Image (cartoon, rainbow, N blue to C red):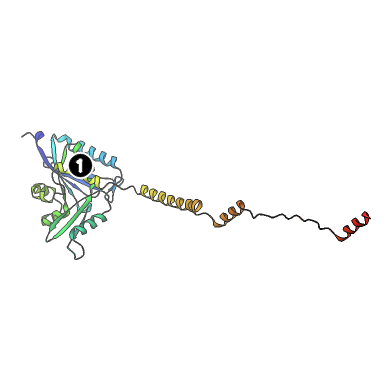
Amino acid sequence: MDIAKKQIPMVVYIDSNRVYFYSDSLGNVLQLEIPSEIITDLEIHNKDKFLQLFSIFIQKNIKGLGVNKFNVILVFSPNMTFDKDIAPQLDKDVETQEQEFIGLVPFENVLSRSYKINKGTRTIVLNNEYFELLNNIFQKNKLTIVMVLPYSLLQVVHPEFAGQLDLSQILQKSDSFKQFNMVEGKQEIHEETAENKKEKKPINKRLIALIGTFGVLLLVLFVFAYMTFFQGNPADENELIQAFTPTPKIETEVVPLPTESADLSTESGSL
């Protein structure tokens, strides 16, 4: 079959500051270094530069191979995932512990899955934003992610991976890893990322703070208005009553009484 019409499997191994590409068509392992200005502590600081970096690398090293489509097995290194072994407790079931652990991961948008291992449960979480950006740029360059695997899990279930990293071995045994896929199938990969993005919508903490402050100011304004216009001041109220109901004043008229001297003078005149 013409190689241009085949779908060639490829392993892409994601580490904290570098990415490895391997396929039989490549002949050797390709390495992409990611500068610290783009990503540090698993967090992507510049999405545009991140996408540009991968796009240029793929165009230069992979697109020229004449392969129509690559099926990518995406493997995240132990440096890229958060893992916890969970055992049942009397006061908490496994599912509750899983959700508590996922809530501790310092990313708002996460991809997670729990696996049954040795009568216990291992929960593995990774930064879903990183995966979504990779999925986006890969699809544009005809690299289809068909499987997402945590390497820390492979090291547990396949002891041969506990030593030196061997991407060719991962590629050869990839069919046996389907049960460990963190997202099931190509169509479900798209649905999963969209669902997680909807459920893990970033919270605008500044908006919440502004709303809280506005609510407090409204409460203070309401109390002030109530105290001013409804309750009033008793002292002022008394002053208003006195102003509108003055104490009436009774004016008295002094009427002079006749004196004895006046009467005598009147009588002598008449004589």
Q: Residue at x 13, y 39 (%)?
A: 70
Judged left or right of residue 56, residue 172 is left
Is 211 displayed left or right of 21 in the figure? Answer: right
Residue 56 vs 128, above or below: the answer is above
Observer-nearest of 269 and 160? 269
Q: How many marks?
A: 1
Image quarter for residue 195? top left
CA neighbours of label 1 inside 10 A, class few (<14), some (14 to 19), many (20+):
some
At 17% from the left and 57% from the top, the residue drawn is: 122
Q: In the picture shown, does residue 64 fall above or below 153?
A: above
Asked where in the image residue 86 lies, by quadrant, the reply is bottom left
For the question of whether residue 163 can be seen, the reply is: no
Q: Secondary structure at mark 1?
A: helix
Q: Which residue is mark 1?
A: 135
Residue farthest toward the left in the current orientation of the protein:
1
Q: Is residue 271 left or right of residue 237?
A: right
Percent coordinates x, y for residue 84 in the rendering: 20, 58
User: In front here: 49 or 255?
Assistant: 255
Q: Which is nearer the eye, 192 or 164?
A: 192
Q: Quadrant of the N terminus?
A: top left
Q: Residue furthest front?
A: 271
Of the residues shown, which amino acid type is indicated by label 1?
Asn
Left or right of 199? Residue 153 is left
Quarter holding residue 260 = bottom right
Q: Which residue occupies the foreground of this view, 105 or 242?
A: 242
- Where is residue 254? Give x, y as percent: 77, 56
Residue 206 picture location, percent across and down: 37, 48
- Quarter of the image with the C terminus in it: bottom right
Percent from the top left, x then y, of residue 198? 24, 45
Q: In this view of the protein, can residue 215 be seen by the observer?
A: yes
